[in-house]
Amino acid sequence: MTAIEELVYLLNEAFSGKGIEASNESQSLLVNLASVEEADWRTPPPGGIRTVESIALHVGTCKVMYDEYAFGPAKLTWGPTFSPGPKGRRR
C-alpha cells in the first residue's frame, strides 16, 4: 500500500470504520458520537471539564483550519471570532 493509499484508508476509517470488533472499540468519531445520549452531550463527565460537544466542536474547527491551510489561502486564525462553518466564515 502506498503512503497515499494508507492515508486515504485511515481517513475513511476515521469517519466510517467499524473499529476493533473484538473489543467493541471504534476509531470513527461519528460512530462514537452516535452513542452519546442527548442529556450527556453538554454535561462534563464526573471529574471532567470538557463536554462531548466542546470536543466535537474542537475537532470540527481543526478540520476547517487544516483544510484552509492545506488547500485554501491560509488566512484563518484562531481567536474568539473564528467559527467553524461553510468556507470558514467568521461571526
Image (cartoon, rainbow, N blue to C red):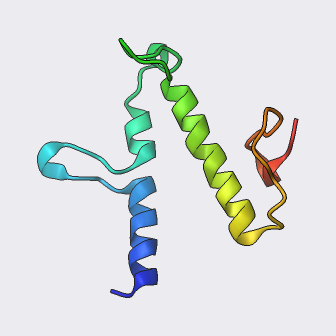
Residue at the image position 39 percent from the left and 43 percent from the top: 31
Is 54 above or below relative to 1?
Answer: above
Count all numbered tags in the image, as a single digit: 0
Is 31 above or below relative to 44?
Answer: below
> Residue 83 at what x, y percent from top left?
77, 39
- Nearer-the-camera pick, 75 or 25: 75
> Residue 7 at what x, y percent from top left?
44, 73
Answer with the quarter of the image where residue 10 lies: bottom left
Is 89 above or below relative to 72?
Answer: above
- Apparent side of residue 17 relative to residue 76 in the rendered image (left or right): left
The quarter in which the N terminus is drawn is: bottom left
Residue at the image position 29 percent from the left and 53 percent from the top: 18
Residue at the image position 52 percent from the left and 33 percent from the top: 55
- Nearer-the-camera pick, 18 or 80: 80
Residue with the most extreme left position: 22
- Nearer-the-camera pick, 75 or 24: 75
- Apparent side of residue 28 relative to residue 91 in the rendered image (left or right): left
- Apparent side of residue 50 relative to residue 45 in the rendered image (left or right): right
The quarter in which the C terminus is drawn is: top right
> Residue 26 at what x, y percent from top left?
30, 47
